Image (cartoon, rainbow, N blue to C red):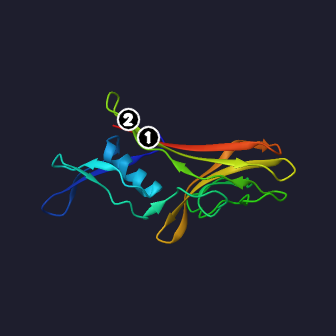
Amino acid sequence: MNVKTYLKIKVINEKGKCIYYRRYRSRSFVANFINALFTLLSGQGVTNVNTGGSTYTTASGFAMQVADTSNDDSYGIQIGAGTTAPAITDDKLTSLIPNGTSAGQMQYGAVTVMSPVINTTNNTGYITVTRAFTNNSGGSITVSEVGLVAHYDYNNTLIIHDLLPTPITVPNGSTLSIAYEIQIAT
């Protein structure tokens, strides 16, 4: 899976010496994690269960949101024409394809964050973030990179950046749909 977490366990004895250290890949995400992620990305509240077994609804705040309106390329799913391999320090797409109908532009649809899907039978969960892009530029446009940008604390922050294995040419009048599915498993 692409969502990875590591559990580090260290034991220091009374003399300050490390006597035990292990790093494990954590595989114990639970439904509340994906629910919290949904709230962060969509700006909507969702019902969780606390450690006492009571349900509560998270605040529908504006903490970290990727849900966006149409015709806005400032956050949500973005597309680009860059060909540089992503790096962990990236803070924007290499070459953003802007919103619009002029040459080299695509019309950005609204970003939708689907409600969490939790499967208690196989202990998995996921959310899906989607956006459609329509090419009304008068010519074909090639998309080679995709990113997910969150509006966070009044800033837009790149949180995912992918270089497509093969660029996609979108003919004039066509619509490109992009979806990010973020999965967890226990």
Report the residue marked by disc 2.
124
Kind of element beneath mark 2: strand
Q: Residue furthest right?
A: 138
Q: Residue furthest bottom?
A: 154
Q: Residue furthest left?
A: 14
Q: Is residue 120 left or right of residue 65?
A: left
* Quadrant of the drawing holding the C terminus: top left
Residue at the (64%, 56%) spot, across then down: 70
Q: Is residue 29 visible?
A: no
Q: How many marks?
A: 2
Badge 1 vs badge 2, beta-carbon distance below 8 Å: yes
Residue at the (65%, 52%) spot, across then down: 109
Circle 1: residue type = Tyr
Q: Is residue 166 left or right of residue 129?
A: right
Q: Position of residue 46 (x, y in %)?
A: 35, 50
Q: Position of residue 113 (x, y in %)?
A: 50, 48
Residue at the (31%, 49%) spot, across then down: 47
- In which quarter of the view is residue 88 placed? bottom right
CA separation in Å, label 1 and label 2: 7 Å
Q: Position of residue 68 (x, y in %)?
A: 56, 58
- Give neighbour class at mark 1: few <14, some 14-19, many 20+ (Cα, 10 Å): many
- Give neighbour class at mark 2: few <14, some 14-19, many 20+ (Cα, 10 Å): some
- In which quarter of the view is residue 43 placed? bottom left
- In which quarter of the view is residue 57 placed? bottom left
Q: Is residue 147 visible?
A: yes
Residue 150's mark?
none
Residue nearest the observer in this picture, 115 or 16: 115
Q: Position of residue 108 (x, y in %)?
A: 68, 54
Residue 126's mark?
1
Kind of element beneath mark 1: strand
Circle 2: residue type = Thr
